[in-house]
Amino acid sequence: MSYPKFEVIEQPAGRLRLITDEQCWLEFKPVWASPLSHPGKYLALLDGKDKEILIVNEPDELDEGTRKLLISELERRVLTAQITEIIEAQTEFGVTYWLTETSRGRKEFVTQSLQENALWLAPHQLLLIDVNGNRFEIPDTQALDPESQKKLFATV
Amino acid sequence: MALAAAEKEKSPEKILLSLTADLTESAEFGERLLEITQKSVRVCLPDGMPVQVIDLEDVASAKSESLVSGGRILATLKTGEQIPVVSYTLTHAEVFSDAAHIIDEMAKGESPFIALEQKVSRCPKCERLLPEDTTVCPRCVSRSKAMLRIAKYLVPYKKQALRLASIALVSTLMTLLPGLIMKQIIEAYENSLGESELFKWMGIWAGILFTMVVLKVLNDRLMVFLAANISADLKNATYRAIEFLRLSYFDRKPVGAIASRVSMDTDRIWHFLVDGLPFLFNNALILIGVIVILMVQNWFLAVCIIMPFPFIILISMKVWRPISNLFHRASQKVARVHMQLHESLSGIRVVKAFAREDHEYKKFIQRNTDFRDASLYADQRWITAHGTMNLVIQSGTIVTWTVGGLMLYRNQISMGEFILFNAYLGLAYGPLHWFAQINNWFSRAMAGAERIFEIMDMPREIVEGEGEQHTVQGSVEFEKVRFGYDKSNPILKEVNFKAEAGQMIGLVGHSGAGKSTTINLICRFYEPNAGRILIDGKDIQDLSLQDFRSQIGIVLQEPFLFHGTIAENIRYGRPDASIEEIMRAARAANAHDFILAKPEGYDTMVGERGVRLSGGEKQRISIARAILHDPQILIFDEATSSVDVETEKQIQEAIQRLVKGRTTFAIAHRLSTLRSADRLIVLDRGKIIEEGSHEELMAKKGDFYKLVQTQSQVNEIIGIA
Ligand SMILES: Nc1ncnc2c1ncn2[C@@H]1O[C@H](COP(=O)(O)OP(=O)(O)OP(=O)(O)O)[C@@H](O)[C@H]1O
Ligand SMILES: [Mg+2]
């Protein structure tokens, strides 16, 4: 372990505190250093000025209480949705209208110029960015049902 | 959805503000209402059921927090407890960050002005989502309106346009004649009218042919003339409109995307005008002519020809729709190839320096292969579809021939009529191949036209002649200025300061503190989100923008030189300056000597971005440009960032000479260079944390002192005294 021993507690409600041997941080936030290519690994904690306090390579090794608090805070902070099904993908006038089923429920969104806004992160991992900058991830295009795959590949 | 606070009644529970968020408590997509009253902040279900009510009295402060793909409002209670109020995706981030600010002010007992508009995200007509910051729904754009607007560009050429229309009319009608002549010839044969009859008709036919060719040439020449002129006029008008757009528009859009509006979108219109419109017009006329003539000759035959039309059109739409998507997909892939090419070529030095040629080659191959596959797929599908269409159209021919032939056999029509029928069959059916495509062209051209008109209709930065002409004395005051490039992420928070006329103000702070941003606001490149900027006590927004800017001189952090000679670049702000004046300015900027040393002196061409000059040379030229401009307010954003110590000294001297009697704002990372400033303003994360003269701040041993300390330590390490 390359980071100092630390603990995260919730006090008062809704407010996380980070306690290391030397210091107690009232204002800090957890972020994923590499959420797309290394999901679930490399959890960094930043202070109120966005300076790195520490980084945990294997969050699974953290003690249960701290890990739970951090992960649930992260879940609140990362609002990217995973697409599980493509119900409709229609390109008209250079604009693509999507109707999808995602990890956060059904969602309709629009993308423009897919050459910039459909990013292949890996051969089967796709990130779609809608016109407002919202992110929609398809972690494994091959895991989609055949119908969705067909619609996807007719579009991107 | 906006309610002005002024309108609020006494009732504390009256809803002052109601906004719709698009995420639930468990961060799933779904609607939630955020309602703010005098007394409380409520989050409700879409049906109005409250899920959370927070008493404003309990709230100490509130803020919005940017999250990945969205954001949330957090309220800190007086107990220290922090509660999430509501979450939203980026679609609504802007308005909710303003709402957080309002809650914060209300919690602190102030009564803020509440006037928030939530962005419409759906087309009010068809309920479809709207693409990016446009209010134009590409599906609902009124085609006829856009067409009319393009037609306005015809006005200067109305003579040519009228001539074109009449020529087109005549020549199209002439295409109908050969069929009739064939019929006459056959009938003359049947009635044994002799060979002279044949020669007569053939003579007429030859005459028609000749006239048609001449008309066609005239027609096409006129058409090209009109299209080229309209497209050029559109390009000029678009460019002019873009020039005056607010800078914030350029931040959000890559330059490439904006440039493509000028070139691609106008080209689409051009193509449509040259290829699509005449095609549509001619063939529609022919079709009408065919139907009318056949109706007169034999209505049953006319019906036979028209009958299969609806089916053919229906089928062709079915066939083409997916194909046009495929072509669109292929065009995206080719754009990606271009992007890759552009990127690796502009970075060729880095590529070579790291010996990554193979890596870049692999990336190129990858994208090129993608494009090859996509376009191959599209082309092959197209060929198949085209074949299918052929089959459908040919079977139309089979059907009509069967009917027509049968009528001929049964002597219900004459041989002449049959020949006519046959000739017109080709005229009517030939263009059918392309009719479905026309709709596609048309949609694209209209979408392009809409995008162009949208830019033209966008709020402009300058309304010519508007605002007060004012000779600037030089005092600059910031009054509670709040600003963020993206409203949800404030960069300057409550900045207050006053610079008296003639003072030199140094702006210092860490990278990203908001120094350049402050300067952008002084130049009125952006408008503050809240607060005012006063120039000589007058609100900057009341001054004529162009007049005001012509009295500011700025040396940007990244000096930009236009393609042209050094002299041209120096006199950019004052094109009438003489060469003596240019040289005087260059001397004052300590640029004269190095310019003389160049082979062509002041006539040396500097490349597109001044590539043949060093960083310090470019900076000195842009200082000379500012000097020649002779402004009342001078701004130096890191004018000495990319030069060595000796050159910096020279530039410093130049600046010293220049600042007398002018209000000057200077940003410098090397703090020692700001020693001569009347006052220093220390910015940190968008707030002023210290203010005072160099000595005062050093004596105070606060943040500025610390900055200086770390810097002199660093300088010792790297060996600068
Ligand atoms: N055009 C822009 N659009 C969006 N954000 C911007 C833009 N320009 C700057 N920013 C952001 O605003 C913040 C302040 O930037 P600014 O350029 O004012 O900093 P600065 O104090 O001049 O820093 P430096 O010393 O590095 O030049 C930074 O976080 C930066 O990322
Ligand atoms: Mg800067």
Image (cartoon, coloured by chain):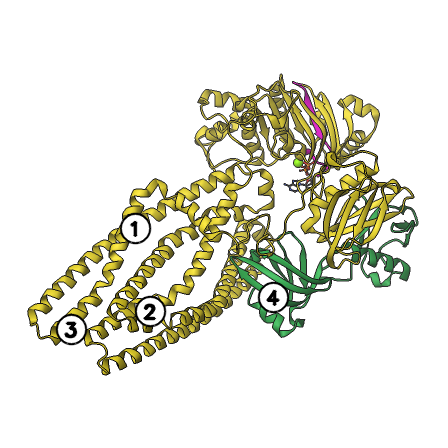
- State the residue in front, B442 or B701: B442
The amino acid type found where label 4 is placed reads: Glu
Nearer mark to the viewer, of 2 and 3 = 3
Is ligand 1 closer than 8 angstroms to the Cβ of mark 2? no
Nearest the eye: A147 or B307: B307
Chain A, colour shown: green
Q: Are marks 4 and 1 in contact (CB under 8 Å)?
A: no
- Residue ID at (42%, 63%): B437
Q: For the C terminus of chain B, which image quadrant?
A: top right
**Chain in yellow colour:** B
Task: Point out which mark residue B527 bears.
Answer: none
Instruction: Indicate left or right for A111 with B146 as reference.
Output: right
Which comes sooner in the sequence, label 3 or label 1?
Answer: 1
In what quadrant of the picture does the N terminus of chain B appear? top right
Dot 2 amino acid type:
Tyr
Residue type at mark 1 is Ala
Q: Image quadrant of residue A67? A: bottom right
Q: CA distance from mark 2 to mark 4?
A: 35 Å
- Report helix, strand or loop for mark 1: helix
User: Which residue was labeled with disc 4?
Assistant: A88
Q: In the image, B4: left or right of B459? A: right
User: Of circles 4 and 1, which is in front?
Assistant: 1
The residue identified by callout 1 is B165
In x, y percent, where is residue B642? 62, 35
Q: Earlier in the sequence, mark 2 or mark 3?
A: 3
Query: Residue B497 placed where, x, y %?
Result: 73, 25
Against B295, is B470 above or below?
above
Residue A12 horizontal/vertical position (percent): 92, 49
How much space separates mark 1 and mark 2, taking CA atoms? 24 Å
Instruction: Kindly report the distance in space between the C-alpha atoms of the residues bearing marks 2 and 3.
Output: 23 Å
Does residue B590 appear in the picture of this structure? Answer: no
